[in-house]
Image (tube, coloured by chain):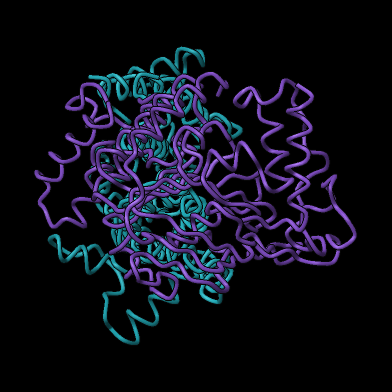
Amino acid sequence: MGRMSFVGRRLLQLVPVAVGVTIVVFFMIHLIPGDPALTILGIHATPQSIHELRQEWGLNRPLISQYWFFLDRLAHGNLGKSLIYGTPAATLIMQRLPPTLWLIVYAAVIAILISVPLAMIAATKKDGIRDQLVRAVPLLGLGMPTFWVGFLLLTLFGVTLRWFPVGGYGTGFFGHLHAMFLPALTVAIALAPVVIRSLRASMLSVLGADYITTARSKGVPGMRLFVRHVLRNAVIPAITVLGINIGFLIGGTVIIENVFSIPGIGELMINSIFQRDFPVVQGVTLVFAIMVVLVNLLADMTYASLDPRVSFDR
Amino acid sequence: MTGAAGTGAVGTASAGIPPAGTGPMLEVRDLHVQIASRRGLVRAVDGVSFEVVKGDALGIVGESGSGKSMTLRAILGVLPPEARITSGQVILDGQDLVPLRQSDLNRIRGPRISMIFQEPMSALNPVMRVGSQIAEGPLIHLGIGRAKAAERALELMRRVGIPDPERRYRAYPHEFSGGMRQRVMIAIALACEPEIILCDEPTTALDVTIQDQILRLLATLCRETGVSLVFVTHDLPVVAQVCQQVAVMYGGRLVESGPVREVLHDPRHPYTLGLVRSAPDFDNVRESLVPIPGSPPSLISPPEGCRFHPRCKFAEEDCLVTEPPLRLLPGGRATACLHHERCIEAIEAERAAQ
């Protein structure tokens, strides 16, 4: 009950964000000087096609009513038709969405699998050699541009060692798991350093907490102590950090999908920009924005469900 | 704690606990604990020795920073990472715990020795249900299943006076009051029926009325289960209420020890005398509070000779150079004062004046 209304309230809070995004997306076209129809269709457009687009998008009407028109179409799930393929932009995006979602979730999972043990190693031997290494080495991942890391991994594991395909999405669950490993790892390498640092810091503070001494004083053995008492408390602050950074990386998938030729919405975005396929660019922008907001909502919910002190009622 | 509440309970508590059994349950021999700090090595515990007889309660008294808590943590092997035992022995039932590895200590902590902490607010895991925290010890140590361990936790909750345990079992620590959380801590400490429980100022963070409840509960449990207690506090009436023996710590060392009544009525160390005088209305010995002048010594570079000499009004020249050993006195007492007879004179003078 409390949880459902929490989700409901958070979804309601999405409305102003969504409105803001639609305004930005809508005005994208109008920010470019000149006739939007001409901008969209390019210099070789025929007067006939310009006229048709004006009719379709309501470009002859006042800006406010154009926006209203845009919102009205959006409310019906209509993002307009792709100028290149002639199919609805929404359909194109829905077809391309699964690989992108796969990439994001896969990357998050790998990042967590890398971060938890490394943070643990660093936190349990604070200021030791292992701690220094764990704090220093992942910074390389943070410092190197994502596309460069992608190329390196692709060259080594895809081209030279041939362990993984050099591109594509694969088929079936295990096919995806195999084909998407390198791109997901690339994203994870960018994501992990931030998560490791945040986890290490929260683990250190948890390790010094009185309740850990209590647990030790009742003879809780090492592994159980770590999982049930340390990790369970330390992940809570790290969840928010993970959520915010996944949000950032959603934009980053645009580049990764191109490096690894993954047929996701990031690649669709780039292609559509090059082809001046405005309705699709607008649609993908909107989807990206919604994804960022949803990831943060998910992080907040995870946080709230892991920490009993956080009330769903607030 | 008010004097009235403290002294009122002295009779009941000490009369209720059975007389001392045979041989020491726990023996601490010449324990040294050092803490690495930025300003240097802190000798937090500097050669402390005492023993606890089976079924007895020993109070360790002293100001903040006198090494009381570090002594307890060293006994249990749960020192903070920057602290370590540099020498000494902690002998529990004939076995020295100091050389043991953590994995071996984990088999002793819980079923044989356990601890209650000062801050019930922070000493419970905030994201774990209270019942599971109580059941965890039995689950690990008693070789019983989840259901049996839960049953045991419910029984313990009843025993420490937590109302409606079935419902409270699934609650989280933040849903409990301070007093109830301390009851949970006591249940955790009792869970595997240890022989000895170390109490680190268990009532300091609580309201006065709740303090008394918790002390009475501890005294009752002691009587019923025959568990020994080491009770660290800076609150003299609390010691009088719960303990039979008392040891006074100053600057990482033991300065006086003996039976509670004798030590608190007739101190044989100027520091104990100062403590008694600065505690409000202890057994109506005197009317006015007399604070101890000065502040506790630095444990990085403690004063030469007797560590208390800079604050001691009885100090003479030999106190500045001679480090006084803990010397035995008649009646099972001991003092580390070179001029302890001055205390007797001071007390007699004071009583004569009244």
Residue at 28% x, 36% y: name it: B130
Q: Quadrant of residue A103?
A: bottom left
Question: Residue B1 placed where, x, y %?
Answer: 55, 24
Residue A177 x %, y %? 21, 64
Q: Colour of chain B?
A: purple
Q: Is residue A128 above or below residue A313?
A: below
Q: Quadrant of residue B321?
A: bottom right
From the image, which quarter does the N terminus of chain A lie in? top left
Whole-percent x and y of residue B281? 64, 23
Along the viewing direction, whichever of B126 and A253 lies nearer the viewer: B126
The residue under the point 53% across, 59% down is B80
Q: Furthest-right residue in view? A: B317
Please tell me how many numbered marks the rendered image carries: 0
Q: Is residue A258 left or right of residue B28?
A: left
User: Residue A292 at x, y = what percent?
Assistant: 41, 39
Q: Nearer the viewer, residue B4 or B66?
A: B4
Quadrant showing the C terminus of chain A: top left
> Is the residue B38 above or below the residue B128 in the image?
below
- Left or right of B66, for residue B215: left
**Viewer-nearest residue: B37 or A79:** B37
Q: Colour of chain A?
A: cyan
Is residue B106 rendered to the left or right of residue B282?
left
Measuring 37% from the left and 42% from the top, which residue is drawn there?
B125
